[in-house]
Image (cartoon, grey):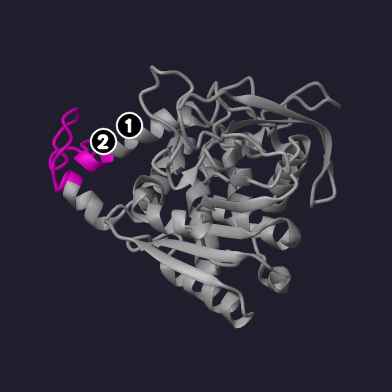
Amino acid sequence: MLVQKKIFRLSELLLQCGRILKDVEVGYETYGTLNERGDNAILIAHYFSGTSHAAGRYNESDPEPGYWDAVIGPGKAIDTNKFFVISSDTLSNVNTKNPTVVTTGPHSIDPVTGYPYGSNFPIVTIGDFVSVQKALTDSLGIKHFHAVCGPSMGALQSLEWAARYPDLIDRVICVIGPGLATEPYLISLVSLWAAPITLDPNFKNGDYYGQQEPVEGLANAFKTITLTCVGYDWALRLYQRRLGDRSPDPALELQGKFAIDQSLDDLARTRASMSDANALLRTARAVQLFSVQERKSRFKAKFLFVSASSDQVMQKAYADRGIKDLRELGLSVEEFVIEGDGGHLDGLNKIAQAAETLRSFLN
């Protein structure tokens, strides 16, 4: 399935913090066809370091398809022969240097000053992400959503949609999400993810554009994120206690690396080269601020919660508390658990396990 990246533009956006953001742009892609009634839409919201690329390939030569390609497409669980599926990049998307990503964020030019926003870019929220998505979907003629769904931070956005627009949504699918609010332990874990950036001397309080960027801090942030998002048994299975093959023996020199550190360092540097530190910090704060707990009485949709058994980031216990709250409100809630040793990332890499549950829930 070949897909095309498109751009949505919004002249201005009133943010939850009270500031107005002008000349907003986000990238998006669609799969399938919107029916005449405009009510066969499914919104896919992406995860923390994800993009709009949920399925398909931009070119036949692309080595990998979108992250949920296993369940999105013709005849698949999220069947694009039936549904019009849409996914967009978030505001302040982490992947600002990825040529397929379009986002307004701290790197963007402030129309008032003519320079990058940097530290002056406002705090944004999950609600702000949803506001942009709502304007986008309105522009496409979507009148009603068969479902909104997404993994990790995408689950937060799905719940925000359900709280804001309860009459527009029939179903909500929360995959590897944190329940109805970001709990204290997760808030602090996300702070730990972000800490290496602010400790990098090149960070300069976020005003580093045109200078040496905080690449080391950003790479260490990505390493921390990746390590917490995978599973213990996954690490044991892949690396054991092997030594790295490009460094001295760690038993002889402090510069020596074990294989797992060498691999995660390489991956983190690659991700850092495509990303922006300020955008990661804004996205992290959006996750920390999330809560629909006080608005749960507004919900009307049916819910499906998909957890991962080895998830140590958005643990199943978080989702269980959300499920309990929703059932106490008399709402319909289904559950599915992905089995594996891949930790939080099983919600992306092993989503095919939930394919038939997704298909049944949507039908």
Kindly identify which numbered label has been placed on residue 262: 2
Label 2 sits on a secondary structure element that is: helix
Residue in the image at 24% along x and 42% along y: 260
Q: Is residue 347 shown left or right of residue 299?
A: left
Residue 76 at x, y percent in the picture: 42, 43
Q: Is residue 236 shown left or right of residue 204?
A: left
- One can see residue 174 in this view: no
- Look at the image and say whether residue 229 sits in the magenta stretch: no
Residue in the image at 77% along x and 40% along y: 138
Mark 2 surroundings: few (<14), some (14-19) or many (≥20) residues within 10 A = some
- The three-letter code of the residue at mark 2 reads Gln
Residue nearest the observer in this picture, 222 or 149: 149
Mark 1 surroundings: few (<14), some (14-19) or many (≥20) residues within 10 A = some
Q: Is residue 108 shown left or right of residue 62?
A: right
Q: Report, in whole angstroms, how far the alpha carbon at label 1 lies from the one at label 2.
A: 6 Å
Residues at marks 1 and 2 touching, judged by CB atoms closer than 8 Å? yes
Residue in the image at 69% along x and 68% along y: 299
